[in-house]
Amino acid sequence: MPEATNRLHATRFMPSVVLRIAVLVAAMFAAALLTLAIGQRSDVGLGNLLQLLLVDDGSLARSAVVDLRLPRLLVAGLVGANLALAGLALQAVTRNPLASESVLGINQGAALGVAIGAVMPSLIIVNLDVMAIMGAITAGIITFTIAGGLGGRLDSIRLILAGVTVGAFSFACVRFAFTLEDNLARIVLTWISADISSVSFAQVPALAVAAGLGLVASLFLAHGFNILSLGDGASQGLGLDPRRVRLLGALLAAILTGVSVSAAGPVGFIGLVVPHLSRRWFGHNHRLLVPVVALGGATLVLLADAASKLVRFPFETPLGIICALIGAPYFLYVTLSARRLA
Amino acid sequence: MIFWPVRAGLAAAALFLSASLSFSASALEVKHDLGTTDVPDEPKRIVALEYSFVDSLAAVGVAPVGIADDNDRSRIVPAYTDIIGTDWTSVGTRAAPNLEIIASLQPDLIIADTSRHEPIYEALSEIAPTIAFDSLTGKYDVALESARIIANAVGKSAEMDARLADHEKTMEGFKSEIGDVSDLSIQFLVDNGKGVYLHTPDSYNGSLLAWFGFRSNLKPNGGGTYTDVIAQSSLEQLSEVNPEIILRGKYADPGLTDSWVGQPLYDAIDAVSKGQVFDINAHEWSRLRGVLASEVSGASLVEVMKKVAR
């Protein structure tokens, strides 16, 4: 095995890595407890949370925690993990640190898929979830095609510009819905601002399956992602078809994004911020990054969800808005510090 | 509410003033939310860009030539078509009315909504004199005041005064039928299947319910934009608002609230446990505002209150 991949793998069992993962897991549980504890009811707090979760005392406080906040927590956490994994895959296959679902227009494509379904129910293929996934895949294909395809001539600048174009076009079409009838506009707006205040357990299984498959698939692809980072020449030298890894990675990202967007709406910036922070703390080995990114994504969206509940009563502040508030400044920071891009 | 006698007095004064002025001038200066506009005497071709302006015109028997009816003629309910007929041209949605169609109607007056149509106010003004009132986020008293000014602009002040006197009688009649409700908290909400929207005390419907004497468990927040006066909410928040009566307008069936039935938090809401969740006509309550609309709402409220155990 060449020295470069050895070096990548060397970090795997360092004690400090285990410690850092333990900290991340603890942070995720803390964020989960926080978002469970925060809400309008004054009879639920960090103090009695575990008791409410574990003991069915038939109280309204327990119902608020188990029937309302728990599904919301699961949706937030799973969406976070899915979007972060999608972002990691996209950054690996494009070898571009700015790649993510929102930057490449995939989020907006999924939004367009749902908006088309909401405005013209006769065009719905299967259901809105499938519309979101199809929108995500279509937007991804268009962006990658404009940027030079998956064949290895992917141009960084063109990729970002193509993503911005596809994203702007999709969102312009989505915004068209605002000029339509008020109630329709309100449904589309609620949806694109990623409001998860009224989710139920029904949305959890699809997200959980996607997260599980996404995690396994990402782990299988992790070796390929590592080798891709060495360049196409090196990958072919190592007997790996870079096009296959790219195609699978991009497809995985589109499916993870589509499933998440159909459940929660287009939550932006998670796929950009989380892989970045993770690489900073855990290095560049994708075998390690995959679980770290999933944990980190869940943690960040859980925190954002907790923050979204603090804004004002009786209004629900959509999750997407909080994530954009976190993500936009970080995006600016990454853009300014990404010297290698040009 | 003190606005009745005060408003009536002011309007009478304004009427006298404007009547004495209009003898000498061929145009009437109308003060409205987006400025002061010269309106020709007794405009004949009027375009209404909100349902409440159709309401105001219908109240004095004037038929608009164009209505932003959201491309659905049934949005203009029989209470209006009985008076204005069905000859209007649809000028598209209220959110984005079609300027070309409006221009093609060669109107001599356009009535626009302050917040919705401010961005296109200049464009509308180039087509015809345009006056704007706060229909979308204005309260009940604002709707009546707008009706008065609109009637004045179309030369029907005397008719509106008579109509408003009738209106007051009708509404006071409803009020006495409903009786003292100052100890009852009520909440009007819209359920569109994806979300619930609470009409706060700062909204038209919130203020209308307050006029009837109901309590609201929501604190007024001083008004503002549409999303300030109509709160997108959730089950946990609604359970904290905990009204004794819920007036529910459903745009989708089954609604989101239907999926909450059986959840302890929903079933424990006072209105739910007492069986006091009442479905009312979402379109009439939520989209229609004004003189006729509030009478329709008042009549349905009387029916609802007959079912409430007192």
Image: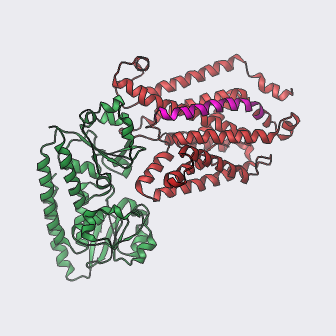
Report x, y in % for residue B156.
20, 73
How is colour applied across the structure in the image?
Answer: by chain
Report x, y in % for residue B146.
26, 63
Quadrant in the rendering for residue A291? top right
Direction from residue B135 to residue A50 in the image, left or right = right
- Residue range in magenta is A200-224
Residue depicted at x 42% and y 31%: A68
Report x, y in % for residue B183.
16, 38
Report x, y in % for residue B78.
27, 63
The one of A23 and A261 positioned closer to us in this rendering: A261
Q: Residue furthest right?
A: A237
The one of B269 and B115 positioned closer to us in this rendering: B269
- Residue B176 included in the magenta stretch of the image: no
**Quadrant location of the N terminus of chain A in the rendered image:** top right
Instruction: Judge whether A51 appears above or below B124 on screen.
Output: above
Residue depicted at x 32% and y 54%: B283
- Chain letter, colour red in render: A
Direction from residue A295 to residue A314 in the image, left or right = left
- Chain letter, colour green in render: B
